[in-house]
Each structure stands twice: as structure tokens, then as C-alpha cells.
Amino acid sequence: MIAVHIQQLFREIFEKEPLLVYSPGRINLIGEHTDYNNGFVMPAAIDKKMMVAIASNDSDQARIYSSDFKEEFAFDVKSFGPKKGHWATYIMGITAQIKQAGYPVRGFDMVFGGDIPVGAGLSSSAALECAAGFAISALFGFNIPPISLVHYAQKAEHVFAGVQCGIMDQFASVMGKKNHVIRLDCRNLSYDYFPLDLGEYQILLIDTQVKHSLADSAYNRRRNECAEVVLIAQQNMPAVKSLRDLRLKDLKAVKPFLDEEVYRRGEYVIEENNRVLEASEALQANDLKKFGKLMYASHDGLSKKYDVSCAELDFLVDFTKPLDYVLGSRMMGGGFGGCTINLVKTSQTETLQTRIAESYLRKFGTSPKFYAVKAENGTGLLKP
Ligand code: GAF
């Protein structure tokens, strides 16, 4: 078990007893690239997590050991800056945000590691920020409110990792609830939990094992394109603050003033937002078939209008379309690689895995990975 491994590693390296904190990765059932447009998303925390062991060291040094990278890193908590591209930047980022909020962070020793596959679009970085933030808060008795932790972790990603992400990943990691999905309104962070009761179906993630290098820059560019639509729309409709405030007919009205590609970005976001609302009704009505159809429609928009898919993701989604034991499939997260999320009949999961593995290997020369996941609780302290 990971918790035991991280705890033992900590004892060996630092020769004292740590506090143990976990923070999960996340899936997103539907609502992609809507969070930074003040729209709706439907994520859940999952049973794959980042573990952090922490203790104070009566100094101003943060000494960190990554169990996955088998590397140490140290920084002075009094004065430091981003270290983009290095795993430590996420921990430095959240530390900086906590300090900036006025909490007197002192030195600490930390070991971390987990079972969230890195680069698979399951938000391992958000989980690390949230786990490290919660650990620092618990260690020094700061009692940082969960929602503040979510904001600090998002800001850490902006400032220290250089990705202008929305709030979904950090929110899901902190606020997740066992056996539930969250429907989050990113405009005001109001949310509802819906039971994730899938009957004879389950959620299967299929990991393409690729992450195309343009992912981060393309992500930031999509944000700018959405902002561009809003700016143009505001000229006629000053009350519009984000794409969330636009209807398709409003967008059509400004079409002549928009680049064709930028128009498609706006169209996708407005449609996806509507899909999340439809999907949450379908889930409440236990209409999984409808939910699955909305997932396919989401992928179609992400691939053809938002242009954040890739050949590997499209292949995996297309593969499932004729199969009556898969209700829905779509790429998940930022895109350009990572996983698809699939609603699959539990009894047919092995058949699906075998068939996909063969075809994927033939086409791309590499094997995909499969993760059947469940919805779990968000960030917390592991009781000794
Ligand atoms: C990434 C981001 F971090 C999220 O905020 C979200 O925008 C997602 O991509 C796309 O829906 O995971």
C-alpha cells in the first residue's frame, strides 16, 4: 500500500514520525474546457492518489524527497521562486500561495509519491499541490478552509507551473465524495453531489500513453481564444462576462467579426455547457444511454471544434462506437493525449480491453493502459 511505503520511506530518510495526507486524482464525466469559461463541469475524485508525509524540522529549509523520481530537492521557505518543469515547482507553488495568504510557513521535511499515472490527464499535479498544501496546513495548525486551499492550488499552477488552468482539478481533488460526482458551477463555485450509481456499468479509463508536447501552450491559447470571443461579444452585449453568458444565437450574431476557428471554439464551449446540464438530468433520471450519447457528442466537439484531441484519442473513441456494451466514450482533461473515459458494461470490460489492446498496438506500435476507477473522498489526513 502506498501510504505505508511513503510513511516507511519518510522514517528511513528523516528518522521521525510524519503526518500522512492524501489527495486524489480526478476524472471528469463531462464538461471539458468549460471551467475557465465560468461554466459547468462534472468531475469526481478517484481511488488513485498522491500521498504526502510531512514533519517540521525547526529550520527554514523545506527538504523534499520524491519517491517516484527518487530525487531530493531543498529550498529556503523564506525566499524562493518557480522552478518550471521540475516536480518541486508544484510544492513550491502551493507553499508560496500559503505564505502569500499570510500564514507563517516554516521549514518542513516531506516525502511524497502516489499511484496517479503522470501525464495521463488525471491531475496528478493538482493532487500534489492539494496534498502538499493540506499537509502544510495540518502540520502548522493553519486550518486553511478547503475552498481557500483549492484557490491556492490553482494559483500555484498558474504562477509556478505556467499553466492557466481552470479550477476543476483542484476542486475535485479537495471536495470529492465517495461514490458521487460533483456538478460544479465554476462561476460561483456552487456545487451538488450526485450519486454515481452505474448499475451494471463501470468507468474505464483508457490511457493512450502519449502526451503531445504542445499540450500546455495550446491550453493557454484556447483560453485566449475564448477571451477573444467574449471581448467581441461585449461590444454589443456589455453584460457578457464569459462564454457562459452567451447563447448560441448571441454567438451567431457576432460571427462576422470572428475568425472561423475562434468562432468554433466559442460554439463548442456553449454546446458543452448545455451538455453538462442535460447530462446531469440524465444521470439523475438514471438514463445512462442518454448520458453516453452526450459523452460521444462532447468528444466530437472537442475533436472537431475545439481541436484538442489527437489521433490516438480519436481512435479509442471511434473503436467503441459500434460496441453495444459501451454507452459512451470521450477524451478527458486538457487533451493532446492522456486518457479516454468510457462507460462500459462491467461484464464486458475484459473483452473490450483485449480487443482495444490488439488494435491499438497494431496501429500505434504501443500498448494502452486501462484503469477501472471509482469515485472517492477528497483530500484528507490519514489517521494513524
Ligand atoms: C485541465 C485543466 F487543469 C482544467 O482546469 C480543465 O480546464 C481541463 O484541463 C479541461 O477541461 O485538466
Image (cartoon, helix red, strand yellow):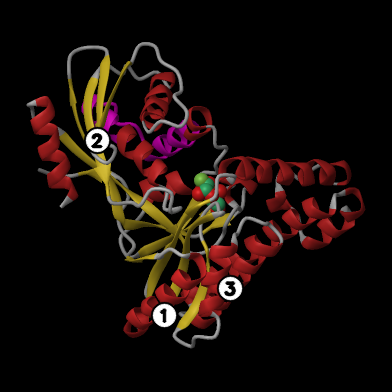
Q: Relative to residue 244, is residue 60 drawn left or right?
A: left
Q: Amino acid at mark 3?
A: Tyr
Assign a secondary structure to mark 2: loop
Residue 90 percent coordinates (x, y): 40, 32
Vertical side of 319 occupied by 370: above or below: above
Q: Quadrant of residue 372?
A: bottom left
Magenta residues span 134-156
Assign a secondary structure to mark 1: helix
Residue 296 shows which numbered tag?
3
- Residue drawn where x is 38% and y is 48% of the image: 118
Residue 245 percent coordinates (x, y): 72, 51
- The answer to which of marks 1 and 2 sits earlier in the sequence is 2
- The answer to which of marks 3 and 2 sits earlier in the sequence is 2
| Residue bearing the label numbered 1 | 355
Neighbor class of circle 3 (other Cα within 10 Å; few <14, some 14-19, many 20+) is many
| Residue bearing the label numbered 2 | 70
